[in-house]
Amino acid sequence: MADAKPVDLDHLARYTGGDSSLNAEILALFDQQCRTILAELEELTGSDANIRAWQELSHKLKGAARGVGAFAVGEAAADAEKVTPTKARAIVERLKRDAAAAHAFIEELLKSPV
């Protein structure tokens, strides 16, 4: 699976009918949502003050990522759901790596003419 793209555009096309402008809009929304959630998760890392918020954010990111076909981000978020924020440093680093790959892929895709 090392050759897999950070976002499975075939998966996304199943829901958008392959409409490239709709794909671009959805990916831009996901990209922003992913950045926001990741920042919020990073703020919670290291403290169990709000485990529920951690789990809700992880779950939200998992669903959004899987919905657009960013499966590596989705799997990392699924793993994040299972840990507490005090034990989450490694998973946050994994999320950051997987999200960075998805961000770069989306950014490059959005530069292309529709």
Image (cartoon, rainbow, N blue to C red):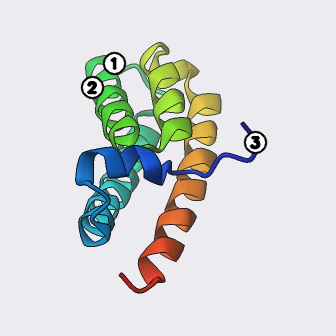
Residue 58 makes an appearance in the image:
yes
Residue 101, percent from left and from top: 60, 56
Task: Give the image location of residue 88, x and y in percent.
Answer: 55, 26
Three-letter amino acid code of the residue under disc 3: Ala
The residue beneath circle 1 is: 51
In which quarter of the view is residue 19 placed?
bottom left
Q: CA distance from mark 2 to mark 1?
A: 9 Å
Comparing 68 with 41, the one in front is 68
Q: Residue at x 46, y 33 (%)?
A: 74
Q: Nearer the viewer, mark 2 or mark 1?
A: 2
Pick whichever of labels 2 and 3 is earlier in the sequence.
3
Q: Is residue 52 above or below residue 33?
A: above
| Pair 2/3: label in front | 3
| Residue 37: x %, y % from top left | 34, 45
Q: Identify the image quadrant of the C terminus.
A: bottom left
Residue under pointer 3: 2
Q: Is the residue under label 1 in contact with that under label 3 (CB below 8 Å)?
A: no
Q: CA distance from mark 2 to mark 3?
A: 29 Å
- Circle 2 residue: 56
In the rendered image, the quadrant that contains the N terminus is top right
Against 1, residue 7 (above or below) is: below
- Disc 1 crowd rating (10 Å Cα; few below 14, some 14-19, many 20+) is some
Q: Nearer the viewer, residue 51 or 5?
A: 5
Q: Of the two numbered discs 3 and 1 on the same chain, state the one appearing first in sequence.
A: 3
Q: In this orientation, which residue lies closer to the viewer: 51 or 63?
A: 63
Looking at the image, the residue that sits furthest to the right is 2
Measure the alpha-carbon separation of dots 3 and 1: 32 Å
- Residue 106, horizontal then vertical, whole percent: 47, 65
